[in-house]
Amino acid sequence: MSSTLRAPCAAQVARRPSWRWRPGAAIALLPAAVVLLAFWLLPLGHLIVLGGNDRDGAGSGYWEVLSSVQYLGSLAQTCALALMVTLSALLVGSISGVFLARQRFVGRSALVALLTFPLAFPGVVVGFLVILLAGRQGLFASLGMNLVGERWVFAYSLAGLFLGYLYFSIPRVILTVMAASESLDVSLEEAAHSLGAGHWRVIWDVLVPGLTPALVSCGAICFATAMGAFGTAFTLGTRLNVTPVAIYNVFTNYANFTVAAALSVILGVLTWGVLLMVRKWVRQSGGLL
């Protein structure tokens, strides 16, 4: 009995990876470690400490943020906006991505290039495009003036910001879904059809589960991008109550570095927590992130 117990233990020991220190590996990792320490860990550590400072006896920056209705509302509004952008981008981008991956037609490459072109634009340009579309002199304003005698302007509100975030989130989903669709086994769908499953049944039982890890991973990236995007929000107006704009206002207009640091850390922790949960779920389900 003892020999049977020892055999699996020996096999487990044999499968354990070797963690021997190699000088060559240390030298190869040294430049990356220096950059990580100098440009990431040290500034991040200083930001965390700065957010805990007591400013004018009002408590730490974290306490000011967590006890303020304005800052908590800004965080909640930012999370809600990022969630709506993510769900909308997944809905639109997944349908388009599957179609483009499965269909071959004249002009397909040009259409894919056109749909993904917004990825080349910075946030400021995206905000400017939203103003040209829904600003005071935009297309919707002219259309509303001609139809009802009133300008339709929503570029400087959360609706305009939603449109801008959606503008550069959909291309990410399209590219991810196209890559995931091309790697799926089409024979599974053919087998489901041969067993009598309808078109929608095949989509729900075969296609959606196969694309779920890619959709969740891409959704997490879209969420994180929408949480921290600043250029588009700043172009559309500094009165928008989203956390990146709030950090900018506190930092530049009031020189309150403590609260700005605390807001930055809390925003980063929220986003990092979402990414961590998604990463864990995707790995458990067999995907990659």
Image: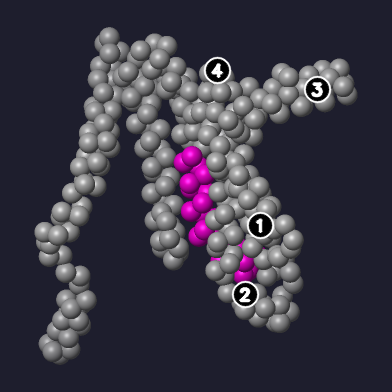
Magenta stretch bounds = 204-225
Residue 181: where, in percent of width, then height? 59, 64
Q: Decide which of tag 3 and tag 1 comes sooner along the chain.
A: 1
Check disc 4 and give the amino acid type: Arg
Q: Which residue is mark 3?
A: 142
Residue 124: where, in percent of width, then height? 54, 28
Q: Residue at x 20, y 42 (%)?
A: 34
Q: Residue at x 16, y 69 (%)?
A: 18
Q: Residue at x 87, y 22 (%)?
A: 146
Helix, strand or loop at label 3? It is helix
Label 2 vs label 4: CA separation? 50 Å
Q: Which residue is mark 2?
A: 186
**Label 4: how many residues lie within 10 Å, few (<14), some (14-19) or many (20+)?**
few
Q: Is residue 24 above or below residue 272?
A: below
- The label on residue 41 is none
Helix, strand or loop at label 2? It is helix
**Label 3: how many residues lie within 10 Å, few (<14), some (14-19) or many (20+)?**
some
Residue 38: where, in percent of width, then height? 22, 36
Label 3 vs label 2: CA separation? 48 Å
Check disc 2 and give the amino acid type: Val
Can you tell which of label 3 and label 2 is closer to the viewer? 3
Label 1 vs label 4: CA separation? 40 Å
Q: Which residue is mark 1?
A: 109
Report if the CB atoms under discs 4 and 3 are less than 8 Å apart. Answer: no
Q: Decide which of tag 3 and tag 2 comes sooner along the chain.
A: 3
